[in-house]
Structure formats: C-alpha cells, structure tokens
Image (cartoon, rainbow, N blue to C red):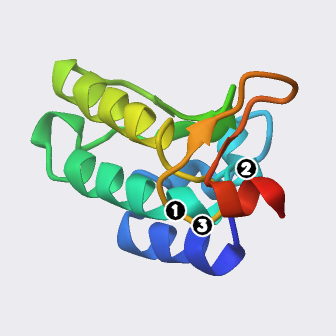
Amino acid sequence: MRPELENKLVADYPKLLANINEGPMVSPMCFGVECGDGWYTIIDETCRLLSRHEPLSGAKFVQVKEKYGTLRIYLSHQDDYADGVIDMAEALSSRTCEVCGQPGKSNDRGWIMTRCEGCRGA
C-alpha cells in the first residue's frame, strides 16, 4: 500500500495500528499494510467498525496482508464481533480488485490474485 494511504490509516486509527512502528521481533506490522491500494476502503471500514467496538479497545493489528488473493487481518485479541467484521472484509476483498478497488475476481491458475479485467491485463 502506498505510504500516504498507510499513513492516513495510522493517523485515523492509531491504537489499531500502534504496532506499525515496532521492530520485526515485536510484530509483523513493522512491514506495514502488505496489500494493494485497491483494498484501502475495505481496511478503512474494518478499522472504523473495530475501533468503535468497546471490548476491543486495546486490540492492535498483528498483521494486515494479502494471501491467496484475499485480505488477511490478524488482531492481538478478538471476539465474535471482530471475527464477523474480519470475515466480511476478507469476503469483500475476494470480489474487489487489489490494485484499483473496482469489482474483480480471483484467477484460477498461477499466483492467486484478485483483479478486475483492466488491471489483470495491465
């Protein structure tokens, strides 16, 4: 993800992204948000929903990345609400182009990625 988008997430949700400045021995978040810009809106909405859920007030992201063509979000601790929000984000990412955010789909061969037709051909 571009640094300016990542920095906006950190500014808007400092508690959730507190591990982003830690070293690799503390948290994989030191590598930042490891996915394309197209999923920014999904991550932003996920952060908004999680940050407003009081039982998760001390939760931090452990890792946010792409894996097998979908978004993966790992929290330091979570409950059923967080599980549902994260499941929703992962499901949305499977139908959203990771590059541009338009509707997309996963390929069925090679390196699995979710792309729209335009970004798949580029």
Q: Furthest residue to the right?
A: 110
Kind of residue at badge 3: Cys
**Structural crowding at the residue carrying mark 2, measured as other residues with C-alpha within 10 Å and reported as few (<14), some (14–19) or many (≥20):** some
Q: Secondary structure at mark 3?
A: loop
Which label's residue is closer to the chain start, 2 or 3?
2
Q: What residue is shown with label 3?
A: 100
Instruction: Residue at 30% x, 57% y: name it.
Output: 45
Question: Which mark sits nearer the N-terminus, 1 or 2?
Answer: 2
Q: Which residue is mark 1?
A: 101
Callout 2 amino acid: Cys
Q: Give how far apart the Cα atoms at labels 2 and 3 are.
A: 24 Å
**Secondary element at image label 2:** helix
Q: Is residue 60 left or right of residue 116?
A: left
In the figure, residue 68 lies in which quadrant? top right
SS for dot 1: loop
In the rendered image, is residue 90 in sight?
Answer: yes
The reply to whether the C-beta atoms of the residues labelled 1 and 3 are less than 8 Å apart is yes
Q: Nearest the camera: 102 or 14?
A: 102
Q: Is residue 15 visible?
A: no
Question: In the image, what residue occupies the spot 23% across and 44% down?
Answer: 57
In the displayed image of the protein, which residue is found farthest to the bottom?
A: 4
Residue behind mark 2? 30
